[in-house]
C-alpha cells in the first residue's frame, strides 16, 4: 500500500523550480552524483558524495542515486516509512555491488534525499554523512540537517565550536555513510514538514557548504528571485572563499529548489 501523507489541502499544488551545479573542484575525478524525479505531485531530489580516499567513490554515489530514484519512480510514495525504504534500498544495492566486485568492497557514499508533496504542501528529508539539506523561508533559515561526523559529535558535546565543522583537520571523518559496515542508520524526519510559496531548499556536498556560511546562504536567498539566481550568487561566494584559502578544493555539488504558489507563478 502506498504511504499517504496525513496532511491534506484543497489548494492547487505548489510549483517547484530547480537549479543544479556540480564540478570536480581541484580534484581529478568528480565523485559526486545527483538526480531528481517527479511522479504526479511528488518530487524526489538526491545528492550523494563518494567518500574520498576510497576506490570507487564515484561508483558508490552513482549506485545510491539511481537506487533511490528507481524505487521512487516505481512506488511514488510519500511518508517517513517510504523515504526510509528508499534509503534502505540504496544501502542494499551498494552492499550487493560491493560483494560482486572485490576491488569495490570499501566504496561508500554520503546521501541527502528530499521528498516534496506539492499537493499536500509538505516535505520530508533523510541523510547519511555530511551532505546537507537546508530549508529557508523568505531569506530566513528554518531547518538544516546535522552532519553524521566526528566533529559534529565534538560540537554537540561542547568540545568544538560550530565554525570548526568547516575547518577542523578531522572534519571528514564520518559516523554514517552508505556502504560502511556498522554505520549509523539513515536519519529521516519523523513527520512531514509544512512548506509554502517562498520556501527554498538547498542540498549540497561538503565541497559547497564548507566555503559558504549559513548567513551568506540566507543573504543570497533574500537577494535572489529564482532557484538559478540563488545558486549562482552562492556559487560565486563558494569560489571566492575557496580560492582565497589556497587549499585544494573538493568536488562541489549543489541543488536549489524554489517553491512557488501557482497563482504567483502565473502572474510572471
Image (tube, rainbow, N blue to C red):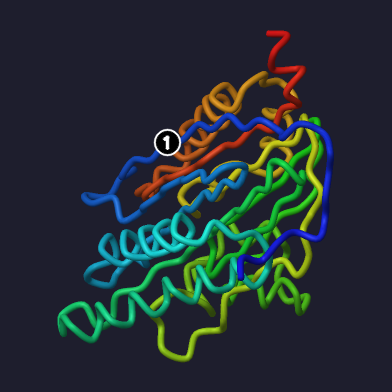
Q: Position of residue 180 (x, y in %)?
A: 41, 82
Q: Position of residue 213 (x, y in %)?
A: 66, 43
Tell me the quarter of the image containing the C terminus: top right
Task: In the rendered view, tell whether residue 175 sits above or below residue 245.
Answer: below
- Please tell me which residue is depicted at 66% across the width and 66% down the height of the picture: 3
Residue 143 left/right relative to 76:
right
Q: Quadrant of the N terminus?
A: bottom right
Residue at image coords 42%, 71%: 90
| Residue 144, position as x, y percentages in the image | 71, 55
Q: Residue at x 67, y 77 (%)?
A: 153
Q: How crowded is the residue under tag 1: few (<14 C-alpha within 10 Å), some, or many (20+)? A: some
Residue 31: x and y in percent read 31, 56
Asked if 216 appears above or below 64 in the picture, the reply is: above
Q: Which residue is label 1 attached to?
A: 21
Outermost residue on the front side: it is 1
What residue occupies the far top of the structure in this picture? 268
Q: Which secondary structure lies at badge 1?
A: strand
Q: Quadrant of residue 215?
A: top right
Amino acid at each position: 500500500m502506498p504511504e499517504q501523507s496525513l496532511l491534506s489541502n484543497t489548494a492547487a499544488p505548489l510549483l517547484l523550480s530547480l537549479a543544479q551545479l556540480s564540478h570536480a573542484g581541484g580534484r581529478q575525478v568528480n565523485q559526486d552524483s545527483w538526480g531528481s524525479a517527479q511522479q504526479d505531485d511528488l518530487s524526489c531530489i538526491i545528492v550523494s558524495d563518494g567518500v574520498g580516499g576510497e576506490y570507487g567513490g564515484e561508483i558508490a554515489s552513482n549506485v545510491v542515486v539511481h537506487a533511490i530514484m528507481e524505487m521512487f519512480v516505481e512506488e511514488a510514495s510519500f511518508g517517513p516509512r517510504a523515504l526510509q525504504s528508499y534509503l534502505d534500498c540504496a544501502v542494499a544495492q551498494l552492499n550487493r555491488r560491493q560483494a560482486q566486485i572485490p576491488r569495490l568492497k570499501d566504496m561508500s557514499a554520503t546521501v541527502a534525499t528530499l521528498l516534496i508533496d506539492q499537493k499536500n504542501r509538505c516535505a520530508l528529508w533523510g541523510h547519511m554523512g555530511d551532505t546537507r539539506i537546508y530549508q529557508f523561508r523568505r531569506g530566513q533559515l528554518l531547518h538544516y540537517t546535522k552532519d553524521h561526523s566526528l566533529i559534529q559529535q565534538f560540537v554537540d558535546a561542547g568540545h568544538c565550536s560550530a565554525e570548526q565543522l568547516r575547518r577542523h583537520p578531522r572534519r571528514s571523518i564520518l559516523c554514517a555513510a552508505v556502504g560502511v559496515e556498522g554505520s549509523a542508520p539513515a536519519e529521516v524526519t519523523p513527520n512531514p514538514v509544512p512548506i509554502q510559496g517562498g520556501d527554498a531548499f538547498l542540498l549540497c556536498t561538503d565541497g559547497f557548504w564548507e566555503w559558504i556560511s549559513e548567513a551568506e546562504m540566507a543573504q543570497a536567498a533574500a537577494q535572489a528571485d529564482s532557484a538559478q539566481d540563488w545558486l549562482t550568487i552562492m556559487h560565486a561566494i563558494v569560489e571566492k572563499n575557496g580560492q582565497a584559502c589556497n587549499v585544494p578544493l573538493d568536488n562541489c555539488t549543489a541543488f536549489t529548489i524554489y517553491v512557488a504558489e501557482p497563482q504567483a507563478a502565473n502572474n510572471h
